[in-house]
Each structure stands twice: as structure tokens, then as C-alpha cells.
Amino acid sequence: MIKVLLFAELQETAGKTSLNIPLENVNVEQLKERLQTDYPQLNLSGVMTAINEEYAKEEDAIMSGDTVAFIPPVSGG
């Protein structure tokens, strides 16, 4: 099981602050693909990803029990 934390617009779109995804031993890209299938309304392009509070790349491995955060770009003014 992977815990996914959602922030800002992702949280609003999903209507949840977190999701529990029954996957293990995948990479960030594979998790994003699964989420796009299960939650097609989520726009995960351009988001920053962190695994266990460390920024991650698309090819970084995610293990069962990890916490993954998706952080959308922030705009300011």
C-alpha cells in the first residue's frame, strides 16, 4: 500500500487530502499512470513529487509503505 498526499488544486479536484493505493515496487511514473487511470480528473503534469519527504524523479522507486506527495506548481503575484 502506498499513501499518496495531495495538495492545493489536486486536493480540491479529488475531494480528498490523501489516497491509499494498493501498489508496491513501482516508480513515480507508474504511480502517476495508475492515478490517471483511477482518477482521470487529476492533472499530474508538472507536479513536483516527493517520496518520504525527499524530492523524487520519475524513475525513482516507490515501495509499499512509502508516502508520496504530489505538489502542484505554485504561482504568486
Image (spheres, rainbow, N blue to C red):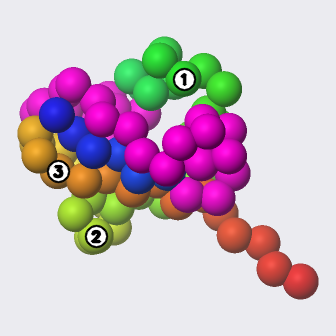
In percent of the image, x 49 and y 50: which residue is there? Answer: 17
First in residue order: circle 3 vs circle 1:
1
Residue closest to the far bottom = 77
Q: Which residues are magenta?
A: 7-32
The amino acid type, in three-letter code, at marker 1 is Tyr
In percent of the image, x 31 and y 52: which residue is there? Answer: 68
* In this view, 35 is above or below 72: above
Q: CA distance from mark 2 to mark 3?
A: 10 Å
First in residue order: circle 2 vs circle 3:
2
Q: CA distance from mark 3 to mark 1?
A: 20 Å
Picture coordinates of residue 67, whole percent (x, y): 25, 53
Residue at the spot of label 3: 66
Q: In the drawing, does residue 71 fall left or right of residue 33?
A: right
Q: Which mark is residue 39?
A: 1
Q: Which mark is residue 53?
A: 2
Q: In the drawing, does residue 36 fall left or right of residue 31?
A: right
* In this view, 17 is above or below 26: below
For disc 2, the neighbor class at 10 Å (few under 14, some 14 to 19, many from 20) is few
The amino acid type, in three-letter code, at marker 2 is Glu
The amino acid type, in three-letter code, at marker 3 is Asp
Quarter of the picture containing the N terminus is: top left
* In this view, 59 is above or below 8: above
